[in-house]
Structure formats: C-alpha cells, structure tokens
Image: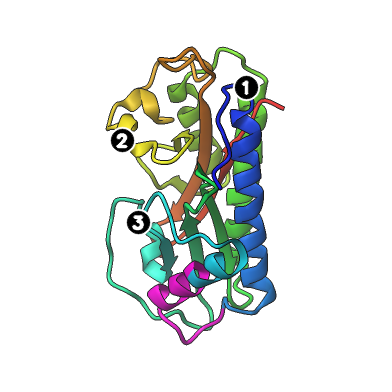
Amino acid sequence: MEKVDNGGDRLSLLQDAEQKAQALLAEVERRGHIVAGQTERQLSDRVYELAYELFGTRRHWHKRIVRAGANTLLPYREDPPNLLISSDDILFFDFGPVFEGWEADIGRTYVLGDDPVKRRLMADVEAGWHAGQKYFRQRPEITGSELYAFSQEFAARKGWEYGGPHCGHLIGRFPHERILGEEVRNYIHPDNSHRMDEFDVHGRPRHWVYEIHFVDRARQIGGFFEQLLTRA
C-alpha cells in the first residue's frame, strides 16, 4: 500500500523511506555479506534479495551500484567491468530502493582489511557529508553551485579530489526521473545558480539527496557517502 502524498508530509515520507534503506544496509552488515571472494554484481544481488525479504520491495529507481577497487573512481553514469572483491579492497554501495512509492537513495563505503589510507578515505567521505549539511543549514539562500564548490574545497583540504560532476539531486515520489531530465537546476551542480530552497512547479518544497565522492587517482581508490539532506 503506497503512502499518500498530501503535500505537507513529503519530507516525513522520504525520511521513512531512508530509515528503511539504512536498516537494509545495517542488516547487510549484520549478516556478514560484505566479504571478499564475490563479484560486485553478486553482492548487489544479495542486497536486492534482502530488500525483498525485509520490506517486500523489488523496485529501485536507479541502477544498483556496488563498486570495488579501481571501479570506486568512477561516477554513477559509468558502467565498468564486474570486479571480484578482494581481501584488502575499498568498496561502496549506491542503492535507490523504493518503499511504499517513495524513493530512498543511500551510499556507504566499506573497507576490507586495515589499510590506513582507505580507512581515512572512508571516514573523510562521511565527515565531508556532515560538513556539507552544516554548511547548507547555515545558508538559507544557498545555491547548488555553492554547495558543490564547498564539497570540492573540503575534498582538497583532506587531500582528495572530488570525483563526480555533481554532488546530489532532487528526490521524491517514484518515479521522479521522468520529470527531472538533465536540467542542471535539478542537481547540486557547479552550473546551478538557483537557490536549493526554491519551490517546485506545484509550489511545494523540493527535497535533495547530497552525495560525497572523493577519489585518489594515483592509488586508484574512491569513497562515497550519500543520504537525504535536511534543514533540521
């Protein structure tokens, strides 16, 4: 049964979807699924089946991503070869499950082994996300280009390069991609000079997912962290 959108509770419905996505990844960890010796696609399929087991959903509003090793350098639109996960890998998830008609979009990084650089990268993408949310909350009139610039600068301060052409996008009731298109105003993009708090065409608040993708091209590693961006 899909939850009804009455306009006023859109954020709470998105937050509920995100909580389910977070519970999904927590269960993936609890069951010990994030291990070496399987391919990226095999691990992605495990998450997909677990989403059905726990929540009865098989809908994902964007392609399911597990990337390991050198594939962690690549942004969303790339479709790299299916790599085998090794015992000292860094890897990340980017999943967009749909719960009761509402989209979630969640990204997390994991490190197998004790490599200190990979572990620092894993910590820095999460820290970068929280720093960006704080920056967003302190600036009511912030634009997409301003938040993207902050994200790039934070990456550089930590010794990384920002890995994506944007750092987030609108999210809403499934399927939002039909109305998003490729307009930069729908992304936290370097060319988006519009205020992020502008209303949509129906006069409703827009809601954003904020994503952090830091890379080290010399070491061929990347990390990713993504979730719903809120004002409070």
**What residue is pinned by disc 3?**
74
Q: Position of residue 95 (x, y in %)?
A: 48, 56
Callout 2 amino acid: Arg
Q: Tell me the magenta residue range.
A: 35-48
Res. 118 in view: no
Q: Are circles 1 and 2 on residues that touch, CB within 8 Å?
A: no
Helix, strand or loop at label 3? It is loop
Dot 2, crowdedness within 10 Å: few (<14), some or many (≥20)? few
Helix, strand or loop at label 2? It is helix
Dot 1, crowdedness within 10 Å: few (<14), some or many (≥20)? few
If you read the primary sequence from the N terminus, does the residue marked by circle 3 or circle 2 appear first? Answer: 3
Spatial CA span between label 3 and label 1: 37 Å
Identify the residue at image location x=45%, y=70%: 44
Q: Position of residue 167 (x, y in %)?
A: 45, 38
If you read the primary sequence from the N terminus, does the residue marked by circle 1 or circle 2 appear first? Answer: 1
Answer with left or right where residue 155 lies relative to residue 192. right
Residue 86 against residue 4 in the figure, above or below: below
Identify the residue at image location x=53%, y=83%: 87
- Asked where in the image residue 30 lies, by quadrant, the reply is bottom right
**What residue is pinned by disc 1?**
8
Magenta span dominant secondary structure:
helix
Identify the residue at image location x=67%, y=30%: 134
Callout 3 amino acid: Leu
Compare residues 188 and 161 and report the one nearer the observer.
188
Quadrant of the rendering where the C terminus is positioned: top right
